[in-house]
C-alpha cells in the first residue's frame, strides 16, 4: 500500500499520507475536502469518508509534505488518479507546514474485497 492514515489511535482516522520516493509524507489541507477523503477511504478499503480534517486535529507529524493540492472528483479508485501537485521545495511553499496536514475520518466498517484485505494486512504490520 502506498496510502495510510497516521496520528490517531483509530485505524479509520488520521492524517492522510502517501509513500513517495521511498518516504511517507503528507498532504497540505489546501482545497482538502470530502472528494479527497472519499478517495483515500475507499483506497484503504472503507466505504466512504464521513469527515475531512484540516490542520492539528490528530497527533502532529514530522517528515516531508509531498502534496500541495490534490484535485479529485471523488470517484477515483486511487489518490494517485487525482491531479496531484507535488511540492518540489518546501522553502518555496508559503504557509504549508504540518499544522496544515489534511486528514480524514472514514466510515469505520470495511468494504469486502481486495482493497479491504490489503488495508487489513497493512494495519497489522
Image: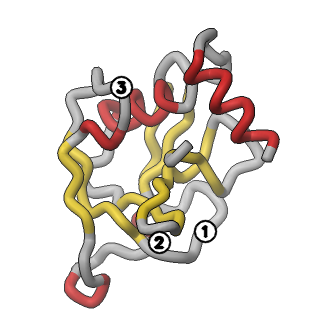
Residue located at (40% from left, 70% from top): 65
Q: Secondary structure at mark 1?
A: loop
The N terminus - image quarter: top right
- Which secondary structure, mark 3? loop
Query: Dots 3 and 1: beta carbons under 8 Å?
Result: no
Using residue 80 as the reference point, say whether residue 83 is left or right of it.
left
Describe the element under mark 2 as helix, strand or loop: helix
Marks 1 and 2 in Cβ contact (< 8 Å)? yes
Instruction: Tell me which label, 1 or 2, sits earlier in the chain.
Output: 1
Taking the spot 32% from the left edge, 39% from the top edge, the residue there is 33
- Mark 2 crowd level (few <14, some 14–19, many ≥20, 10 Å Cα): many
Look at discs 3 and 1 and give the one toward the viewer: 3
Q: Classify 10 Å Cα crowding around label 1: few (below 14), some (14-19), many (20 and above).
A: some
Task: State which tag comes first along the sequence, 3 or 1.
Answer: 1
Q: CA distance from mark 3 to mark 2?
A: 26 Å
Residue 100 spot, x, y in % from top left: 40, 65
Say which residue appears at 28% left-offset and 21% top-offset.
75
Q: What distance separates the C-alpha of mark 1 from that of mark 2? A: 7 Å
The disc placed on residue 98 is 2
Model colouring: secondary structure
Q: Nearer the viewer, mark 3 or mark 2?
A: 3
Give the side of residue 26 with respect to residue 33, left or right: right
Q: Which mark is residue 60?
A: 1
Q: Which residue is mark 3?
A: 77
Is residue 83 toward the left or the right of residue 45 in the image? Answer: left
In this view, the residue in front, 124 or 15, is 124
Q: In 3D space, how far apart are the residues under numbered discs 3 and 1 (Cα atoms)?
A: 28 Å
Amino acid at each position: 500500500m502506498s496510502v495510510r492514515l497516521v496520528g490517531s489511535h483509530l485505524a479509520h482516522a488520521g492524517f492522510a499520507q502517501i509513500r513517495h520516493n521511498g518516504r511517507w509524507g503528507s498532504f497540505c489541507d489546501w482545497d482538502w475536502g470530502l472528494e479527497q477523503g472519499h478517495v483515500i477511504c475507499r483506497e484503504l478499503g472503507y466505504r466512504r469518508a464521513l469527515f475531512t480534517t484540516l490542520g492539528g486535529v490528530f497527533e502532529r507529524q514530522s517528515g516531508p509534505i509531498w502534496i500541495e493540492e490534490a484535485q479529485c472528483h471523488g470517484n477515483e479508485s486511487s489518490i494517485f488518479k487525482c491531479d496531484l501537485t507535488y511540492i518540489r521545495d518546501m522553502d518555496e511553499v508559503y504557509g504549508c507546514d504540518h499544522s496544515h496536514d489534511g486528514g480524514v475520518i472514514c466510515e469505520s466498517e470495511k468494504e469486502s474485497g481486495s482493497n479491504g484485505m490489503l488495508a487489513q494486512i497493512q494495519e497489522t504490520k
